[in-house]
Image: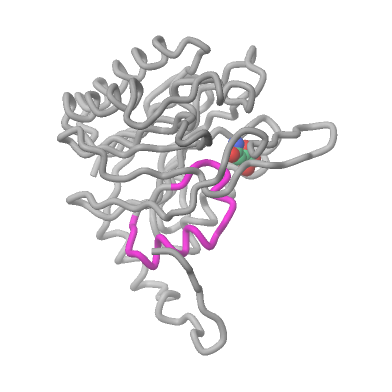
Amino acid sequence: MKIALVQLAVSATKADNLNRATQLVSRAAKEGAKLVSLPECFNSPYGTSYFPEYAEKIPGASFDSLSSMAKENQVYLIGGSFPEEDNGKLFNTCCVFNPKGEMIAKHRKIHLFDIDVPGKIRFQESETLSPGNSFTTFDTPYCKVGVGICYDIRFPELAQVYAKLNCKLLVYPGAFNMTTGPAHWELLQRGRALDNQLYVATVSPARDTGAKYVAWGHSTVVNPWGEVIATTEHQETILYADIDPAYVEEVREQIPTRKQKRDDMYTLDWKKS
Ligand SMILES: NC(=O)CC(=O)C(=O)O
């Protein structure tokens, strides 16, 4: 399965973001991608003050555009994320569409990005957002896919649950920054991929040095062996990679850690379906 990660240059103008996303998804499909992903906050700048202003209901205008992009281009589309308003609460939400344009999954960021690194970065998503409470997977003809958003990648248990649910590819739309990006972005992806012996893809917005929150960029794909098989710098681009579900099985047979877990000593316990 050829996948395409759209590292979109996100501006403060929602209509421009939607137009650029439409063009780039169409270009990715013409290049043969079967699954395309947009980045976190693909239609608004990333920041707690922007979330209330840019929030939309689901369904709504951005939802409709994403649905059309998937249908017109006959692709599975992971719609990055946008701020969602529901019953007076805001969420950082990713909608996933099948090639008919139907929504087949919706992920609300489970782990909110609340950090304070003195002198570097303080960010408190919980100032305006509420967390999601569900796991998100969907089926394609090629393999099952698990979805997380950005900070979700820091929680190995989530990736482990997805691996147990038989996902062979995890996709994280995400916007790391100039402090945590160089330090942790690739390391986390390789860790999640190697621990769970599956593919991990991350999709960042392009870097805008004039923005309040400067994204690291560097959208990347890591294979089940822990190798980076595709990556890029920080400009707007489309990153392509081939996902081979048979290779996941091959690696799992070669190094059978999944069968060697000591369930008599520890188990992964999850409380939601
Ligand atoms: N923006 C995020 O949600 C996460 C992030 O930047 C980090 O974990 O670092």
User: What residue appears at the point 64 percent right and 12 percent down from the top-left corner?
Assistant: 210
Q: Quadrant of the N terminus?
A: top left
Name the quadrant containing residue 43.
top left
User: What residue appears at the point 30 percent right and 48 percent down from the top-left corner?
Assistant: 243
Q: Quadrant of ligand 1?
A: top right
Residue 243 is covered by the magenta coloring = no
Residue 45: x and y, percent? 55, 20
Name the quadrant containing residue 212.
top right
Name the quadrant containing residue 82.
top left
User: What residue appears at the point 43 percent right and 25 percent down from the top-left corner?
Assistant: 56
Residue 207: x and y, percent? 56, 21
Whether residue 182 is visible here, answered yes or no, is no
Residue 122: x and y, percent? 75, 34
Q: Is residue 233 above or below residue 78?
A: above
Q: Quadrant of the C terminus?
A: bottom left
Q: What is the residue that sits farthest to the right in this orientation?
A: 119
User: What residue appears at the point 51 percent right and 79 percent down from the top-left corner?
Assistant: 267
